[in-house]
Image (tube, helix red, strand yellow):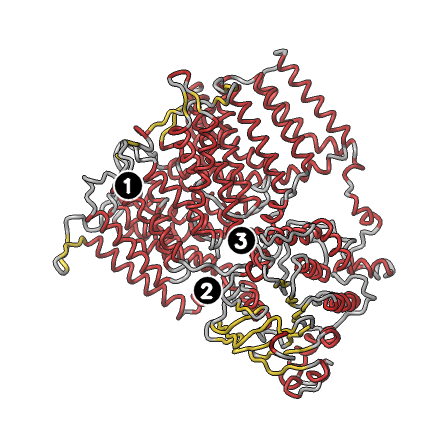
Amino acid sequence: MYGIAASGLVVTYTTSGIFNFAHGAIAMLGAFLYWQVRFDWGWPAPLALLAVLGIAAPLLGAVLHIGIMRGLRGTAEVTRIVVPVSVMLGFLALSRWIWNPSPRERRVLSKFFGSTETVSIAGVNITYHELIALALAVVIALSLRYLFFRTRPGVAMRAVVDDPALLELNGGRPERLATMAWALGAVLAALAGILITPISGGALSADALTLLVINAFAAAMFGRLRSLPRTFLGAAVLGLSINYVFAYFPADRWTWVSNFRVSMPMILLFAVLIVLPQDRLRGATVLRSRERFLLPSMRTAVIGAVALVVVMYLLREILSDTAIISLSFGMTLAIIALSLVLLTGYAGEINMAAVSFGAIGTILVYHYGVSGSGFDARTTLLGYVVAGIGCALVGALVSLPALRLRGLYLALATLAFGVFVTNMVLREIGARVLPIFHTEFSIFPAGTLSVPKPKFGPFDFNAMPTFLMFTTLLFAALGVGLIAFRHSNYGRRVAALKDSPAAAATLGMNVVKLKLLVFMLSAAIAGVGGALMSAQLGSVNIDRFDIFISISLLMLTVVGGIGYVSGALFGGILLGVAFGGLSDTFVKLGTDHASLDGLFEFLKDFVTVLPATIGITMGKNPSGVVHDIVTSFRAMARAKPVLIGAGVLELLLYVLRRADVINNWYLLVLSFMVLLLLPVVAQALMPEAFVPEGEERKDEDDVPPEFIGIDRPFTLADRDHLDQALGLHGNGGKLKVSAGQAAAEVEL
Amino acid sequence: MSEHDSLLHCRDVVVSFGGNRAVDSVSFDVHAETVTGLIGPNGAGKTTLFNVITGLLSPNSGHVFLHGKEITKLPPHKRAQRGLARTFQRLELFTSLTVRDNIRVAGEIRNHWGLGDNIDVVAETDRIIELIGLHEVADREVSEIPTGQARVVEVGRALMTQPRIVLLDEPASGQTEQETRTFGRLLRELVADGLTVCLVEHDMSLVMDVCDQIHVLDYGKMIAYGSAEEIRNNQAVIDAYLGAPAGL
């Protein structure tokens, strides 16, 4: 079963170079769809199978590739990971929308031919369903092997990965082949979903099936995401070890066994990661990646930080209590997102479980950082320091095996870590006697931790508005710190590491050491941010640290602009405030206007799908929203009077609000309009500010190069211009033919 | 030339990709304070050999020695710390940094080797930029400058680590004739100051101009070596590599 799922993963990865994080989600959709047609609508099984596996799944795979994945060629690894992750979140939200997650009756997929019909082989009773699954796995393994090595499309599919351009020259059609591969991958995923569900209990669960991808990639990792035979071997090892744990570990004596069993794939994955030999150091994966981040100067950074604090202070004065609460929640998430800016934006590595580090931070603060009791309980500075250091150490442990390998492996390792934290650490709710110390200790007592607000020395941040200012100040300070870091020699070395690991290593850099340092720093920030998030919420349970929250935060930060500190602010606020706020608003509107309930119900559900939709568009704009804003406002920096005018207008609006002439909604809408109209007004009033300096000559000379000499005479200036464009600097117009080229010609 | 003044020494290096022997038991020496050329048609295994020497690729068999000490098993950064630097045929510049920062960061990496003999990074960066003649484009983004100049940035970056030996992988491709001549003069100056250079290059005028010794690779095998004059007249080289003396 794992074999089928994993082989689908390998098929799409080898043909498109994209690791399909949505693989489990496709399996999930397949299973749900099958349930819908087979059990809800009562179609006969063969017809239902044909509909799901023959039509829906390949269509889904093909549409995915044509609509989304195709646009990802030439983007950085981060984008190639985030977009499929967005698809995964989108499918998950979609399935919750269509199939209510808490149904009146459990949705059960029964086994083919029932669970009572068994055959006996060598003394073991096997259901027909299991037999079918086993046979299918073998058939699929053999036919995939045949497809890839013996048939023309299969060989061509393998060629796509190596060099799509060359294949195209040879008459292949890389895009069509990749579409076929995605369709095939989707069918394999859906099949796996339909087969696995009855065996693992029968009840459909969207989250569990989506995370199937982890089990699948643990298996695929045996074959280094390349080799199909080794993938099937890995799947067999995985399946067997899970069953052995189930059979031979006494669950009644060790309460952690059932959790351990769920975590088996993760543990196995780590084992494989440790065993895998070090990757060859590679140079830049893409010669000129489409992502471009501008680095703000220290002056801009400090101005931005002060502006943020001032705006937040002014907002605090006029906002309602609930708005302040959700805003401060957003700020704590933004601090966690900062850890991603450091790790992903600056160093090019990916952590998919930032919030899980937040969970570790929370646990540490809860155990070592609470003073006082009842209403006087506060978390201490020491607690947060312990949380930071602890998370850095855990981060080192998690990342070390994967850091020797490529970025994708680190992303997978952190994903596995996130699920491991949820499944094992946060389920440790009962007390245990520690073997050496003989004292009772429970990691996550009773499943809920109450974490009080911080109080550092004389500064008490218990009141929510004060807490908001504290988190804003901390974010601003950390943000300026990060930009300072990027300007320092450490920052330049990290940038060098991101741009070309091979060149960095040949200059004498210990690549693994620097990566480790950055990861530890990032984990520490995430840990402190997570602890603050728990303090903001007051009490937290396991759901607060779900892996999907980490992934959403990563996605929204990338959408905002992973290379920018403001991208973290964007991601945190959007996740903490905007989407939660929007869906709450629609629920309230729905109850207020009962007749329009259906519409608002739809809008509420639509909002849950929205973040993923935004994430998917990343393929088109990989640098992020903040980048667009920065570039458009850069030009405006020269139109100072207009900027000042807008500032005065904003201030006026704020004063009107304080005087209660207008309410918050007016302020929000009007401010938004000012921002939107600003570029337009600036362009109308001060057009001269928008002519970029280097391009004046364009105005006088807009004859396209191919018409020079026809429309007007060819001049020396034109020649120099062409030389420059072709990279032939100051050469007297004479082309040099190197002996190598000459030799190549002679050989022909 | 005797063994003892050989700064870099490769012995019986073999690299196979699948069934294809890209480098087939190649042995060669680079002597201190000389320019040694490594030439051969495309696919002869020159870059592969550089990858083996710098540690980006481990050979199937064979040994690499630097200063008479074996470095075959060392990771790339340890080799660099022993005075080995290189440039890349496929440019490997740090594209998010300016020209100046590309060179500067190499010095900063060097100062983190933990050797204790730290250099003044800012002053040394200025000196190198002046030396390689890129002061006019020093503050441009490295992705904006033409390929010919970008190759010189790679050379400057390598020099910033104060190496004993530099491996240059086609530094003149993409350069204009003028730039190549200037570059050749720069190489001779550097060697006169004590640097050792190993040069892979297709531009024969540069190779013949600056190289003290030339090794010729063809299909992974070393087919000839000698001075520029000897190589120019070597029949095996003319047959295998040039086909006819027209290229010279």
Chain letter belonging to callout 2: A
Q: Nearer the viewer, residue A268 or A141?
A: A268
Badge 2 amino acid: Arg
Q: Which marked residue is nearer to the observer: mark 1 or mark 2?
A: 1
Q: Nearer the viewer, residue A640 or A704?
A: A640
Q: Residue furthest bottom?
A: B235
Chain letter belonging to callout 3: A
How many neighbours does mark 3 have within 10 angstroms: few (below 14), some (14-19), or many (20 or more)? many
Chain letter belonging to callout 1: A
Look at mark 3 in the image and give the residue it sits on: A511
Residues marked 1 and 2, same chain: yes
Q: Earlier in the sequence, mark 1 or mark 2?
A: 2
Badge 1 amino acid: Asn
Question: Which residue: 47% across, 55% down?
Answer: A405
Tell me the quadrant of the picture where the N terminus of chain A can be found.
Answer: bottom left
Q: Earlier in the sequence, mark 2 or mark 3?
A: 2
